[in-house]
Image: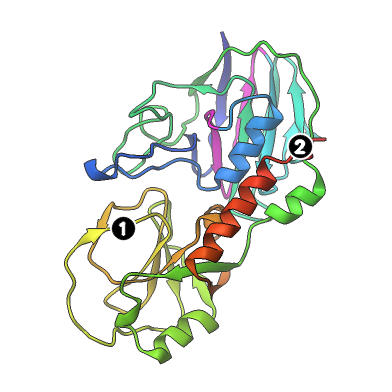
Amino acid sequence: MTTIVVQSPGLFTTVQDLGREGFGPMGVSPSGAADPISLRLGNRLVGNADGAAGLEVTLVGGTFLFPEGAVMALTGSDFDATLDNAPVGLWTAFEAKPGQTVRLGATRSGARCYLCVQGGIAVKPFLNSASTHILSGLGGLDGRPLRKGDVLKIGSAKAPFRKRTVAPEILRRLSPRKVLRATPGPQSDWFSESSLQAFYTRAYRVTEESDRMGLRLDGPRLPERSGGQMITEGVPLGAIQITSAGFPIILFVEQQTTGGYPKIANVISADLASLGQLRPRDEIRFEGVDWQTARSLLVEQEKLLSSPELNV
């Protein structure tokens, strides 16, 4: 059996795959990788299916021992990684020999790094997914972040090591955005023209209270024009709610599945991965687009991810 021994877990490291879709009516949000593009690319680099489970490391990394060795890749943000103290680059497959250790430091760029291993992380699935759902304490390894001394099993893998690297042009075109494109929300007409103009033209700052449930923003206050109350309704991933205090929250991968705040807009699907790389105090802006543009941007992104030139 091939394993990973957690010598140090870092600030917040969890097992994540692409999430558990379709259980919103049961009150279970998808969870899954905060930056699914990075997880998908990391899995392809090591020869896994896109949805194989990997480790999601947040802000400060840990130390991971590979007693039997492994083929792996690091994707997402730069965490100053080393393999037995030798620097390891992002977006390329590499091989750890038996007994070698991977160390990840503090992030140098975005919020999250993904450690993908050939064979994937083998944990008991919950609702067809290996993803850790922190709020409910389900999925992943005992429904929690990793701790020192944890031992993770790696799934069986028979493919020989092949050094793969993602082409720089592909990475440039898929790089995280700080200008997030958004479509109108179902309650956008609750807000005055001046509030809508402020929302789409002025900057917001990600606050320290942000987490995988939602990104809380500080910036222009956006009072409702109607001042009325709404009935709680279903909310999608990327919905931008405006609280009673007038500040936005972007609902994220462990969002509640219903909400009673008005939704001024929704981050488009093609930009959801960018949310996963936002850190506290990062500055962002919103750009309004229509639904047809949002769909076209997602189709374009998926075509890029299917490009034969993805790995060289």
Considering only order in the chain, which callout, 1 or 2, is on the residue closer to the N terminus?
A: 1
Instruction: Give the label, 2 or 1, closer to the camera.
Output: 2
Judge whether 160 appears above or below 117 on screen. above
Nearer to us in this view, 275 or 294: 294
Find out whether residue 218 is within the magenta segment: no
In the rendered image, is residue 162 in sight? yes
Which residue is farthest top? 1
| Badge number at residue 235 | 1
Q: What is the magenta range?
A: 51-68
Judge whether 154 appears above or below 35 on screen. above
| Badge number at residue 185 | none
In the rendered image, is residue 280 in sight? no
Q: In this view, does 25 lie to the left or right of 178?
A: left
Q: Which amino acid does label 1 sit on?
A: Val
Q: Which residue is drawn at 46% across and 68% down?
A: 183
Which residue is farthest front? 292
Q: Which residue is drawn at 79% across and 36% down?
A: 165
Find out whether residue 63 is within the magenta segment: yes
| Badge number at residue 308 | 2
Q: Which residue is drawn at 74% across and 41% down?
A: 90
Answer with the quarter of the image where residue 218 lies: bottom left
Image quadrant occupied by the N terminus: top right
Q: What residue type is labelled 2?
A: Pro
Q: Is mark 2 on a helix, strand or loop?
A: loop
Nearer to us in this view, 21 or 1: 21
Q: Is mark 1 on a helix, strand or loop?
A: loop
Distance, label 2 to label 1, CA atoms, is: 36 Å
The x, y position of residue 164, in whole percent, is 79, 30
Nearer to us in this view, 158 or 181: 181
The x, y position of residue 214, in whole percent, is 40, 58
Q: Is residue 240 left or right of residue 257?
A: right
Which residue is farthest bottom? 194
